[in-house]
Image (spheres, rainbow, N blue to C red):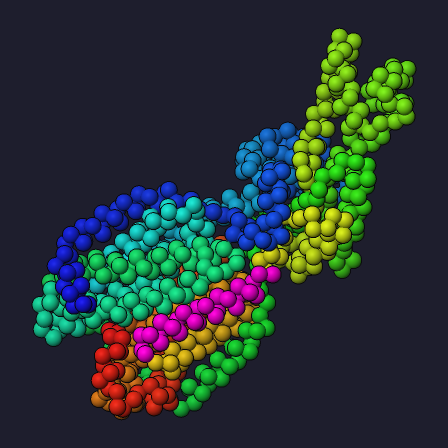
């Protein structure tokens, strides 16, 4: 069956080449249609506190986005005027400057702070308007809109550079390790087509995350290189035996179907494990990368045969000798104490990685944001949502709750910068007015106000919101009797009241905004969220809800332990199953999975020791990638070993298997390592660079364990892997890895 399919592909190689290239061009045109999502909160599970709060807020209000604007060397009047025109911008809910707490001296300059809260839907436009208005004024600005803008700009600027550098490094590796100067360019053609197919077909999703967008192409370049290497090695080996290009390609395809498919399946298994994360960015990354691996495999099977057959004369003309690296030398180095030391390293890594601490958000800020935080503290928003109650008792409950929250402190320092709520920002509308106070407010005589009160049926005093509402109604009925100045004052009061009501009171839920002097990565963040939630539930029970980045990060931290266990177990289970089916053995998948899992633990322990903490997304992604991708090297070496054992004793079989596998392992491994380090060193986006660095470290550890520990494990476990009375069965069932 494999022979027939291979023969059909070779016979149809020209139409298949044309089809694949046309599809690549079409997909290249659809890449611009792919929407990139920069909002990590949107990937939280719907049952989390942040998403529950966000759903309520979206149904009753608009989302909120906080910004801090610091004017340098401006006067107090400048700060108040700036706050006034910012407050007048469309989409701005609040903008204020506190003359007491919002002024700081730094490096010979005076900075005056303006806190801004805008509707999330308008926040980008508000940020642009502020930057345009203050273009000629020395200032600093920080907050979510600026962070998102910088993130988009950095990814757009850096990713082409990262891709170019990765390609140059990988090209250098391939030129050094290949048998022909033309081979690397064939590899890049195949990879380029597969990357275009993958990126172009992402339009089928509503959006992909910025993490996926940034790393998918580079990881596809590194992960899928194996398939091209396997096929071209098989093709060249058969041509060296005297077969014509078409016959050699037919046989190479038939021989390579299983090893390439097995290699792809282990990588896909690692990617699909991410799909089961409760933090659904894992689904996003897993599906896109799994699709990329499948498309890479199909491109190798459908496009590469035609390219290799057509270019076979040029391959001969550009042939050169690859570097000779002795497999026997490495196997001799893998004896004695080296395997024992590596096993001890695995044990140490396993123990140490349990002590890792994890971070859940970006630790770095741009210089302006850093200075604003140093001068005025952090400004992270938490939104409190609770049932709307406009009675005096309801507002008093609000005041009591917020007073308790404002008392929260860590190390003796309060963490609440400010509170924006109907009972604070709209407090004037909730005051009670008797006749003298109302006369002072409205500019009428007390006799006139008493007449109005009598007309309204008010005997003693009345709350300002009700007073304004009734006065407006009365004034509209008797507009001819109301002075123009008084009518303007009433309309202005009504506008302010409506703004306060629409900002803080919804049809079913009210909200309050807490500004916290607390970094998202602070060790107190979890306790702060828990205390705020406890106070909210104390007053409103489970009808209360929270939202905001701090709450989202707390939800992510809470779900991380479950995701970590789930991803690890699913990755191990799927990879074990695939290897078991491929080898029809239990001992081989157990050995290989334990080896690569040991490499994962060493990587995590080292990262924790060097970096101080591990970014949670790095752990989840790198566990899946390292297991799914680098176990291929172990499969390759083990497969060759089992074949060599049919005619050679264990140590000679290991040496021969190493010689047969070494070029592929080093070429693919170096491609993965260099691509990872290129991402890590060039990108300034923490999410991206940390994934690249950790993946590169993991690939280094995996390659070293494959080369220096696996050979000895094969010898130690030989009696359970090689059954003397079943060599024929082994020959028929062995994955034919080239």
The quadrant holding residue 736 is: bottom left
Quick one: 249 or 188, which is closer to the camera? 249
Please identify the dominant SS of the magenta region: helix
Q: How many numbered discs? A: 0
In the depicted structure, whether residue 320 falls above or below residue 554: below
Q: Position of residue 85 (x, y in %)?
A: 64, 29
Residue in view at x 40 percent, y 81 percent? 591
**Range covered by the magenta-colored residues:** 558-584
The reply to whether residue 506 is visible in this rendering is yes
Residue in view at x 37 percent, y 47 percent? 204
The reply to whether residue 99 is visible in this rendering is no
In the depicted structure, whether residue 160 falls above or below residue 628: above
Q: Image check: 395 left or right of 662?
A: right
Q: Position of residue 127 (x, y in %)?
A: 56, 37
Q: Position of residue 220 (x, y in %)?
A: 35, 59
Q: Is residue 296 magenta?
A: no
In the depicted structure, whether residue 236 falls above or below residue 721: above
Q: Point out the residue furthest to the top here.
A: 480
Residue in view at x 27 percent, y 53 percent? 193
Residue in view at x 78 percent, y 30 percent? 429
Q: Image check: 137 left or right of 668?
A: right
Q: Position of residue 334 (x, y in %)?
A: 37, 86
Q: Is residue 577 magenta?
A: yes
Q: Image check: 398 left or right of 176?
A: right
Quick one: 123 or 386, which is closer to the camera? 386
Q: Look at the image and tell me in which quarter the C terminus lies.
A: bottom left
Q: Look at the image and tell me in which quarter the N terminus lies.
A: bottom left
Q: Image check: 166 left or right of 646?
A: right
């Amino acid at each position: 069956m494999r022979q027939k399919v291979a023969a059909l592909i070779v016979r149809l190689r020209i139409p298949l080449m044309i089809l694949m290239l046309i599809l690549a061009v079409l997909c290249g045109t659809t890449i611009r249609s792919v929407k990139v999502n920069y909002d990590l909160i949107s990937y939280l599970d719907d049952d989390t506190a942040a998403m529950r709060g966000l759903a309520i807020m979206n149904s009753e209000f608009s989302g909120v986005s906080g910004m801090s604007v610091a004017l340098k060397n401006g006067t107090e009047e400048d700060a108040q005027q700036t706050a006034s025109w910012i407050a007048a911008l469309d989409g701005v809910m609040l903008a204020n400057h506190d003359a007491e707490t919002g002024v700081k001296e730094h490096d010979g300059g005076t900075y005056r702070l303006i806190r801004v809260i805008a509707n999330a839907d308008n926040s980008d436009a508000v940020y642009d308007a502020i930057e345009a208005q203050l273009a000629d004024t020395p200032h600093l600005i920080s907050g979510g809109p600026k962070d998102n803008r910088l993130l988009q700009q950095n990814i757009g600027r850096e990713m082409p550079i990262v891709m170019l550098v990765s390609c140059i490094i990988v090209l250098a590796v391939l030129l050094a390790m290949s048998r022909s100067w033309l081979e690397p360019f064939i590899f890049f053609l195949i990879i380029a087509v597969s990357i275009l197919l993958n990126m172009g077909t992402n339009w089928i999703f509503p959006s992909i995350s910025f993490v996926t967008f940034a790393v998918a192409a580079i990881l596809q370049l590194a992960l899928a290189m194996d398939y091209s290497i396997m096929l071209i090695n098989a093709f060249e080996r058969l041509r060296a035996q005297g077969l014509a290009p078409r016959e050699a390609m037919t046989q190479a395809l038939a021989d390579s179907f299983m090893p390439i498919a097995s290699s792809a399946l282990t990588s896909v298994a690692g990617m699909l494990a991410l799909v089961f994360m409760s933090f659904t960015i894992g689904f996003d990354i897993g599906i896109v990368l799994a699709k990329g691996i499948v498309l890479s495999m199909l491109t190798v099977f459908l496009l590469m045969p035609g390219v290799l057959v057509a270019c076979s004369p040029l391959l001969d003309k550009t042939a050169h000798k690859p570097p000779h690296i002795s497999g026997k030398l490495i196997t001799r180095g893998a004896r004695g104490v080296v395997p024992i030391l590596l096993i001890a390293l695995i044990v140490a890594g396993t123990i140490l990685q349990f002590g890792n601490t994890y971070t859940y958000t970006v630790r770095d800020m741009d210089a302006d944001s850093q200075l604003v935080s140093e001068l005025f503290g952090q400004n992270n928003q938490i939104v409190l949502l609770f049932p709307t109650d406009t009675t005096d008792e309801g507002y008093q409950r609000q005041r009591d709750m917020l007073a308790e929250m404002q008392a929260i402190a860590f190390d003796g320092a309060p963490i609440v910068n400010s509170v924006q709520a109907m009972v604070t920002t709209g407090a004037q509308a909730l005051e009670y007015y008797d006749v003298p106070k109302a006369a002072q407010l409205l500019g009428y005589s007390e006799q006139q106000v008493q007449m109005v009160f009598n007309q309204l049926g008010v005997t003693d005093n009345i709350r300002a919101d009700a007073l304004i509402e009734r006065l407006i109604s009365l004034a509209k009925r008797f507009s001819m009797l109301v002075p123009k100045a008084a009518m303007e004052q009433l309309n202005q009061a009504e506008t302010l009241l409506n703004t306060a009501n629409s900002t803080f009171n919804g049809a079913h839920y009210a909200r309050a905004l807490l500004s916290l002097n607390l970094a998202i990565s602070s060790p107190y963040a979890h306790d702060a969220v828990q205390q705020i939630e406890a106070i909210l539930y104390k007053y409103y029970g489970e009808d209360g809800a929270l939202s905001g980045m701090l709450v989202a990060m707390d939800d992510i931290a809470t779900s991380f332990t479950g995701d970590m266990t789930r991803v690890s177990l699913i990755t191990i289970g799927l990879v074990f199953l695939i290897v078991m089916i491929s080898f029809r053995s239990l001992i081989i998948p157990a050995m290989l999975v334990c080896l690569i899992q040991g490499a994962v633990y060493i990587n995590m322990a080292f990262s924790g020791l060097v970096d101080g903490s591990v970014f949670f997304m790095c752990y989840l992604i790198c566990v899946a990638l390292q297991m799914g991708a680098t176990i291929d090297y172990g499969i390759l070496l083990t497969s060759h070993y089992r074949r060599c054992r049919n005619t050679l004793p264990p140590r000679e079989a290991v040496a021969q298997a190493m010689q047969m596998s070494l070029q592929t392992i080093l070429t693919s491994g170096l491609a993965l390592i260099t691509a990872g380090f290129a991402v890590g060193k060039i990108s300034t986006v923490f999410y991206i660079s940390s994934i690249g660095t950790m993946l590169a470290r993991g690939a280094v550890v995996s390659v070293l364990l494959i080369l220096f520990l696996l050979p000895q494990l094969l010898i130690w476990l030989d009696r359970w892997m090689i059954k003397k009375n079943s060599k024929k069965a082994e020959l028929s069932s062995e994955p034919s890895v080239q």
